[in-house]
Image: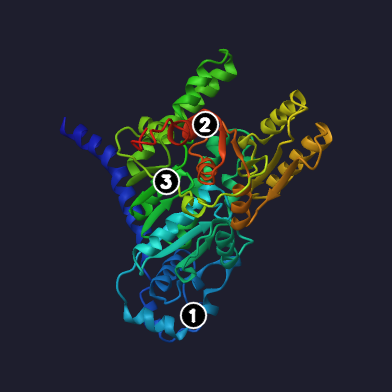
Amino acid sequence: MIPYLFFVIAVIGLPIIITRILCNFIRKKLFALPNDFKQQAGHIQTFSNVPSGLKQGSIRRSLILSSLNPNKFNNFRNQKLSSIITQSDKEELSKGKKRRYIYGFFHPYCNAGGGGEKVLWKAVEATLTDDSTNIVLIYTGDIDTDGATILRNVQEKFDYTLDSNRIVFIYLKYRTLVDDKTWPRFTLLGQGFGSIILSIEALFTCPPDVWCDTMGYPFGYPFVSFLLGIPIVTYTHYPIISTDMLKKLRKQPRTMKNLLKYYYWRIFMLSYQAIGKYVTVIVTNSTWTNNHIKQIWSDFPTTIIYPPCSTEKLVSYIETSRKNQCVVLAQFRPEKRHKLIIRSYHSFMNKHPDCKPLNLVFLGSTRSVIDKAYVKELTNLCFEELKIPKHLIEFKTDCPYEEIKAILNESTFGINAMWNEHFGIAVVEYLASGLIPLVHASAGPLLDIVVPWDIVGKKR
């Protein structure tokens, strides 16, 4: 009996012991400097004498923590660290200043200019403001855009001015692995696998003290936990798979394809549920998202923090004349349902030919050539297929923040047609600008924004 007991303990315990030994070894490699690096730092002029591989991440981390200007230790276009080491950095490294913390924000599309990015940069601003010694890493896949340009875009689009000296951009080579276009089949599984590879690449390039996922790639969390053992903070805009999706699929005809798809999604959901135990702080952006996350990660507390909406910059108490104009403020992506808006607008104008013409203005950012092609597709729909007069509809892409404010303040209506919009920053901005919102009755707009309000009691 006793030999069998020892055998069971060995079978169960050995993998755990091996995993812990392996994780401790990797953590040492990721965090620990070469033994003689501090002695070398006073004399070293290039990085040619310093070991490559895993140690490059620990060296970059050490230099970031020790520098007066951490931002110069980015890896834009494989920039050589050797060319930017200064005497002051060497002196700071040898002094060993007050303990500083590195917050790593994992946001592969940080330059996209949408609501998710507005949340990211507000979180960065709050982190830097909270403590003057805090340093922020931005893990991004925007490999063709330098940090100065990204921060300039942030200033133009969101009106945020950030301390660029304490923001370090870590460029990731494999962002295509989380692009849905890379995985035409088994998209969820492919993106989950891609996020794991991308997370590991980020950790090896420069390990942080706190991992902050502001975009929603949870399958990297177990690897962050195993490899570094650091706190993980997630700001969830929407669940990658929800119980609604499973319920909707169950109502479909019971074909073999739908049955296999249901079990594929079910297994994926179980994996998603298991990931919750690795998260230290769970934050969601709306009541709708929070309700879904509580169903998925039911054993863990969640908090709602609504996205920044810049309402204080939009409210105007000066009476101004408004145009008979409707605005659609949304990223140019199919899920925003621009085509539905255009076809509905066309139908309305045909049914009411005698009414005063209503102008329609589409405002939004474009992340890539795919988004730009989508805008072209929309213009073709308007002017080639539906023959809508060109003076009635206008498309404006990647506008500066001040121009967006001006257009909102001169318009009368604001549209959001997305189904299950997770929150709806644009809808709040419509209201703050004095527009009448026309929105889909679902998710964030329905539960959090366009709600019955007691103006006397100032409550719902």
Mark closer to the observer (1, 2): 2
- The disc at residue 85 is 1
Are discs 1 and 3 less than 8 Å apart at CB?
no
Residue sitting nearer the eye, 423 or 408: 408
Q: Nearer the viewer, residue 150 or 423?
A: 423
Give coordinates of residue 139: x percent, y percent: 50, 57
Q: Pointer 3: what residue?
A: 235
Q: Circle 3 — which element? A: strand
Tag 2 or tag 1, which sits nearer the N-term? 1
How far across and how far down the image is residue 428, in percent?
50, 42
Nearest to the eye among marks 3 and 2: give it.
Answer: 2
CA gap between label 1 and label 2 equals 49 Å
Q: Which residue is mark 2?
A: 420
**Where does residue 107 sit, x and y in percent of width and height?**
50, 52
Could you tell me how far apart the alpha carbons at marks 3 and 2 are, in whole angstroms? 18 Å
Position of residue 332 in the picture relative to residue 429 (left or right): right
